[in-house]
């Protein structure tokens, strides 16, 4: 949870520097959990025909999705920086099928050891946990 909060609080719109694999994947995990919980609650209340609560949770889902859009892009760009790639490499995901597979490989690849052009090695910095 500390990794998620670090992205949201400390690095909300920080596109500079580098992000470790742990930071990127933990942010993604907690982001998915929150989205799934909101979507499931909206679906359950819709199935129970309680439209007011269903719309409330669907509205919360949409607001949350908008609020985490910039932090999600920022942590993704910083993750690419950790592997020595430019943030513009994110656009490779527009290539059908192969682009998303290539990005997944980059996200899972260990970052450059030591400093690179985007900053110091984040593994040398203290963990937020």
Image (spheres, helix red, strand yellow):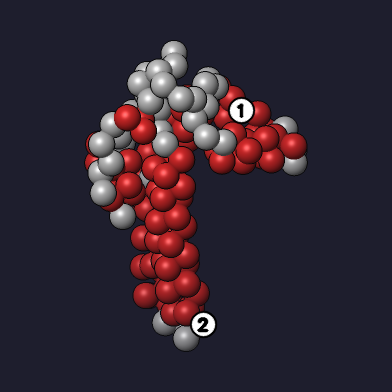
Dividing the picture into quadrants, the one containing residue 11 is: top left
Q: Secondary structure at mark 2?
A: helix
Front position in the image: 14 or 40: 14
Name the residue at the bottom extreme. 48
Dividing the picture into quadrants, the one containing residue 114 is: top left
The structure residue drawn at horizontal position 44% and vertical position 16%, both measured from the top left corner, is 116
Task: Say if 39 sits above or below 127 in the image.
Answer: below
Name the residue at the right extreme. 97
Dividing the picture into quadrants, the one containing residue 117 is: top left
Q: Give the side of residue 41 with respect to residue 106, left or right.
A: left
The structure residue drawn at horizontal position 31% and vertical position 36%, both measured from the top left corner, is 12
Front position in the image: 9 or 19: 19
Task: Say if 3 sits above or below 126 in the image.
Answer: below
Task: Say if 39 sits above or below 98 in the image.
Answer: below
The percent coordinates of residue 22 (x first, y second) are 42, 44
The percent coordinates of residue 15 (x first, y second) are 39, 26
The 10 Å Cα crowd at callout 2, few under 14, some 14 to 19, many 20 or more, is few
Q: CA distance from mark 1 to mark 2?
A: 38 Å
Front position in the image: 44 or 73: 73
| Mark carried by residue 91 | 1
Question: Is residue 13 visible to the viewer in this orientation of the structure?
Answer: no
| Mark carried by residue 47 | 2
Question: Is residue 127 visible to the viewer in this orientation of the structure?
Answer: yes
- Total number of numbered discs in the rendering: 2
Q: Secondary structure at mark 1?
A: helix
Of discs 1 and 2, which sits in the foreground? 1
* Residues at circles 1 and 2 in contact by the CB criterion of under 8 Å: no
Front position in the image: 95 or 79: 79
């Amino acid at each position: 949870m500390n990794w998620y909060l670090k992205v949201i609080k400390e690095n909300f719109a920080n596109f500079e520097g580098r992000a470790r694999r742990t930071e990127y994947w933990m942010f993604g995990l907690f982001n998915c959990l929150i989205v799934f919980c909101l979507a499931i609650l909206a679906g359950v209340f819709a199935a129970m025909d309680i439209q007011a609560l269903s719309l409330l949770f669907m509205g919360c889902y949409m607001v949350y999705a908008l609020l985490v859009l910039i932090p999600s892009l920022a942590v993704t760009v910083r993750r690419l920086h950790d592997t020595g790639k430019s943030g513009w490499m994110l656009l490779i995901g527009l290539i059908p099928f192969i682009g998303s597979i290539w990005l997944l490989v980059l996200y899972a690849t260990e970052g450059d050891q030591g400093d690179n052009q985007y900053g110091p090695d984040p593994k040398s910095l203290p963990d937020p946990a």
